Image (spheres, rainbow, N blue to C red):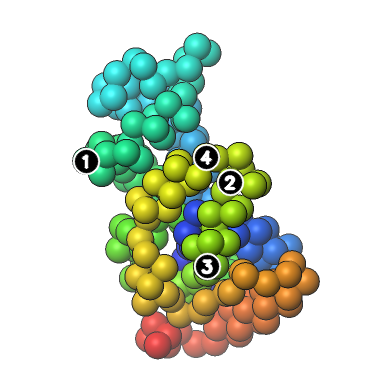
Amino acid sequence: MLTVGLTGGIGAGKSEVSRLLVECGAVLIDADRIAREVVAPGTPGLAAVVEAFGEEVLAPDGGLDRPRLGSIVFADPGKLAVLNSIVHPLVGARSRELEAAAAEDAVVVHDVPLLTENGLAPLYDVVIVVDAAPETQLDRLVRLRGMTEEDARARMAAQASREKRREIADIVIDNDVPLAELERRVRDVWAELVRRARAPKDPAPE
């Protein structure tokens, strides 16, 4: 098994890369999706979030009001740290369960938005960073996700810098390119991942 940490700044196109890797044959463990599952209605995770932030972060249906919670934590690093301290251990435990269930020769891709911020690179055999220029990220967040420019900039600022992400990368995928070029790059990366998965285990790649 080869474990891959996939990360990138918000709006860089990490979800598109993860989709393409799955098409190639990767087993995807999506930290964002798991993060939603561990704070679903009725879970201990949601109870802990409500205890920390109050019932104002609940939607009328009893689920988590994500935009409301986001507006609170992304404006306050201390509150973001509190939320992360609740959610991240739950996500980590569930991710390990899913990885253990994968086939022995699988390429397991962990889609982890905050991999850099949380110092998780050593957990993976290979770290892939999806990279895009900040102006590209901003354009996608405003144009495609409907964020205000202020909100988009705040979310970008809450993450590690582009330089910090690139420092921990074994492989960088440039996503300031047309989709056809991105697809070609991902296929090349997949071939390299399969090669590493089948090779005898060496020390972590340089």
Q: Residues within 10 Å of mark 1 (few under 14, many from 20)?
A: few
Numbered tag placed on residue 148 in the rendering: 4
Instruction: Tell me if label 1 and label 3 are in contact, CB under 8 Å.
Output: no
Rendered residue at 34%/15% (across/down): 55
Frontmost residue, 99 versus 44 = 44
Instruction: Tell me if label 4 and label 1 are in contact, CB under 8 Å.
Output: no
Residue 16 makes an appearance in the image: yes
Query: Above or below — where is 149 with respect to 26?
Result: above
Quickly name the residue at label 2.
142
**How many dots with numbers?**
4
Ranked by sequence position, the earlier of labels 1 and 2 is 1
Q: CA distance from mark 1 to mark 3?
A: 27 Å
Q: Is residue 148 left or right of residue 188?
A: left
Q: CA distance from mark 4 to mark 2?
A: 6 Å
SS at mark 2 in the image: helix
Q: CA distance from mark 2 to mark 3?
A: 15 Å
Q: Nearer the viewer, mark 1 or mark 2?
A: 2
**Amino acid carrying mark 3 in the image:** Ala
Q: Position of residue 198 (x, y in %)?
A: 58, 83
Numbered tag placed on residue 78 in the rendering: 1
Ranked by sequence position, the earlier of labels 4 and 2 is 2
Numbered tag placed on residue 120 in the rendering: none
**Amino acid carrying mark 2 in the image:** Val
Q: CA distance from mark 4 to mark 1?
A: 23 Å
Ranked by sequence position, the earlier of labels 4 and 3 is 3
Instruction: Tell me if label 4 and label 2 are in contact, CB under 8 Å.
Output: yes
Quickly name the residue at label 3.
133
Q: CA distance from mark 1 to mark 2?
A: 26 Å
SS at mark 1 in the image: helix
Instruction: Tell me if label 1 and label 2 are in contact, CB under 8 Å.
Output: no
